[in-house]
Structures are given as structure tokens and as C-alpha cells.
Image: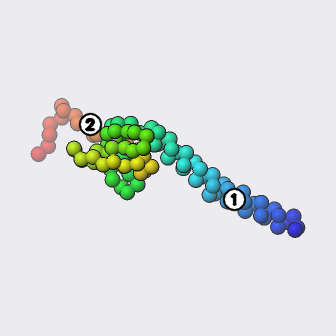
Amino acid sequence: MDPTSLLLIVAAGAAFYFLIIRPGKQRQKAQAQLQRSLQPGTEVMTTSGIFGTVAVVTEEELSLEVSPGVFMRIIPAAVARVVQPAPQPEVDEAAPEEA
């Protein structure tokens, strides 16, 4: 096998690692950190697009309040992301309201 072919194979292996394997491991690590950080009161979105507030956290499942008094049991892996609450616009009470 000539050195050029060997160099090409090594370069392809390195590209595969840096473009596919390494980012996948970083995503897995971030998802595991997200699952460990879940606490009651946290607003989340599931992988299926359901929004809710975490009510109870155990090692094997979460209780998610999706509507007042409506709870769903899900596994922690189903949480896609934590939802940051939208900033509320400040209302200047001294300014008169327009009709």
C-alpha cells in the first residue's frame, strides 16, 4: 500500500471522528446534564413538542403538569429542552393609557 492511500484513509477516519462521533458524544453529555438538572417548577418541552412544568422528579420518571391540574408521567429522556420564560414587557404606570 503506498503512503498516499494510507494518508487518505487516515484523513477520512479523522474527518469521520471530528464530524460525526465527537459532536454526538457532546450532545449526549449535554442531554445527560439537562436531565440531571431538572427540578420541580422547571418549564420544559418534550421531544414530542408538549410543553409543561415539572411537578415531581424521581430517578425513573417525571410528573409534568401540562395544564392546571393535568399531569403526565414521562421518562427524563423525553425532555428535549428547558424553556426560558419570555421576558414580560414593563408597563409604565405613570403614562396615561391610550384608548
Residue matched to label 1: 15
- What residue type is disc 1 on? Ala
Give the residue at the far right of this rendering. Answer: 2
Dot 1, crowdedness within 10 Å: few (<14), some or many (≥20)? Answer: few
Asked where in the image residue 54 lies, by quadrant, the reply is top left
Residue 75, x across and y down, in percent? 40, 48
Element assignment for label 1: helix
CB atoms of marks 1 and 2 within 8 Å: no
Q: Nearer the viewer, mark 1 or mark 2?
A: 1
Dot 2, crowdedness within 10 Å: few (<14), some or many (≥20)? Answer: few
Question: Where does the N terminus fall, quadrant-wise?
Answer: bottom right
Residue matched to label 2: 90
What residue do we see at 59% from left, 52% from top?
A: 23
Residue 30, x across and y down, in percent? 52, 45
Give the spatial CA distance, label 1 vs label 2: 50 Å
Residue 2, x across and y down, in percent? 88, 67
Residue 12, x across and y down, in percent? 73, 62
Residue 5 can be seen in this image: yes
The tag earlier along the polypeptide, 1 or 2, is 1
